[in-house]
Amino acid sequence: MAYIFGLIIVGLLFLSLHYFTELTRSQKLIVAGIFAVFISGAIMYNTYVAHEQEKVLAIVQKYRQGQTIQCGNIEINSTNFDLSGTNSFVGKKNTPYHLQVIGASECK
């Protein structure tokens, strides 16, 4: 839905450039190119963030299923770590990892 809204905004920008400005054709093309680069960057950023969110959710799901997760040289499991609300693993008391915090985004 956001992409449709974005296309409408782009269309309104081009209409305003066409009818309501005294810019030359090359200046209009430069403005349109800059705007297109900006929109492309936003789309690539959104795609990257969505991919990272899927990765973190897959790691959290593995943890909740009782599987062991590798984070660097540390093995994360429910006997040594708790899952916090920020998708981070916190070392349990009376373990070698007590109060150690590891973000789920750092795991594989």
Image: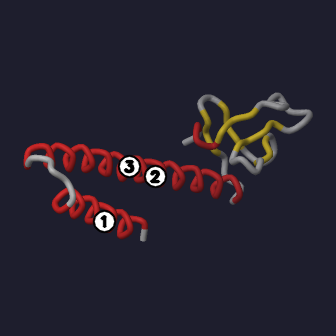
The percent coordinates of residue 46 (x first, y second) are: 43, 52
The percent coordinates of residue 101 (x first, y second) are: 74, 34
Q: Is residue 31 left or right of residue 107?
A: left
The percent coordinates of residue 16 (x first, y second) are: 24, 60
Residue type (three-letter) at the residue carrying disc 3? Ala
Question: What residue sits right under mark 2 in the picture?
Answer: 51
Residue type (three-letter) at the residue carrying disc 1? Leu
Question: What residue sits right under mark 1 in the picture?
Answer: 7
User: Of the residues tagged 3 and 2, which is closer to the observer?
Assistant: 3
Q: Which secondary structure, mark 2? A: helix
31 w.r.t. 95: above or below:
below
User: Distance of mark 2 from mark 1, alpha carbons?
Assistant: 23 Å
Picture residue at 36% right of the left edge, 63% below the top: 6
The percent coordinates of residue 94 (x first, y second) are: 91, 33
Picture residue at 57% right of the left edge, 55% below the top: 58
Foreground: 80 or 39? 39
How many numbered circles does the render carry? Answer: 3
Foreground: 11 or 82? 11
Foreground: 6 or 25? 25
**How crowded is the residue under tag 1: few (<14 C-alpha within 10 Å), some, or many (20+)?**
few
Q: Is residue 108 left or right of residue 39?
A: right
Q: Are marks 2 and 1 in contact (CB under 8 Å)?
A: no
102 w.r.t. 83: above or below:
above
User: Of the residues tagged 1 and 3, which is closer to the observer?
Assistant: 1
The C terminus: image quadrant:
top right
Q: Earlier in the sequence, mark 3 or mark 2?
A: 3
Question: What residue sits right under mark 3 in the picture?
Answer: 42
Of all residues, the one furthest to the right in this rendering is 94
**How crowded is the residue under tag 2: few (<14 C-alpha within 10 Å), some, or many (20+)?**
few
Picture residue at 27% right of the left edge, 59% below the top: 13
Q: Earlier in the sequence, mark 2 or mark 1?
A: 1
